[in-house]
Amino acid sequence: MPTLTGSCICRNIEYELKLVSNDDARTSLCHCRNCKKAFGTNYGLTAKVPKDTFNLTKGIPKEHIADNGSGAVIYREFCQNCGSFILEYGDAAKDHFRYICVGSLDDPEALPPKGEFFCKARASWMPEIPNVFHKQMVKE
């Protein structure tokens, strides 16, 4: 059973992911406007994991709750000291999944992307990732 660790920059927030297999995580890029704003770059990069595999081992993140731009509520958790984004989840997923910010993992290479969402909003200069799924919208 692989255990992955992660944290914010200042390490006030630390966590573990205890996956049966790294295949239990679905890492994907999201090119929607909301993810671009939240991540402060041209896409969001998260790994969808079962909620019970995520365990905070240090600190308590601050939570931001808002409309994700499409009328759905999204919860984002981050370090209130350094501002590092740790995870997010929506109302539909909150009881079962967490979307871990891959950059907060101590070894982000452990969970490579399996796909891309909102490809219609991908920056024109950014190439498509080969050999993964590509969806123009989330539900396709």
Image: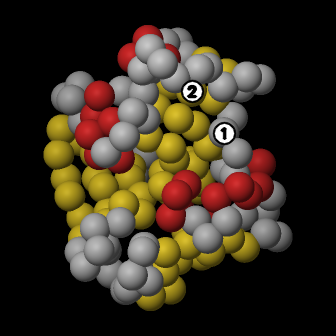
Q: Which three-letter amino acid code belongs to the residue tagged 1?
A: Pro
- Residue 132 is left or right of residue 115, and the answer is right
Q: CA distance from mark 1 to mark 2?
A: 8 Å
The kind of secondary structure element at disc 2 is: strand
Q: Is residue 71 above or below residue 127?
A: below
Query: Is residue 61 in view from this perspective?
Result: yes
Give 117 or 56, whichever is nearer the viewer. 117
> What numbered label is drawn on residue 116?
2
| Image disc number at residue 14 | none
Please name the residue shown 58% across and 37% down the image.
28
Q: Residue at x 73, y 22 (%)?
A: 130
Q: Are marks 1 and 2 in contact (CB under 8 Å)?
A: yes
Residue located beneath label 1 in the image: 113
Q: Position of residue 108 (x, y in %)?
A: 64, 58
- The amino acid marked with disc number 2 is Glu
Quarter of the image holding residue 4?
Answer: bottom right
Q: Does 32 sit left or right of 105 as displayed?
A: left
**Above or below — where is 119 with respect to 42?**
above
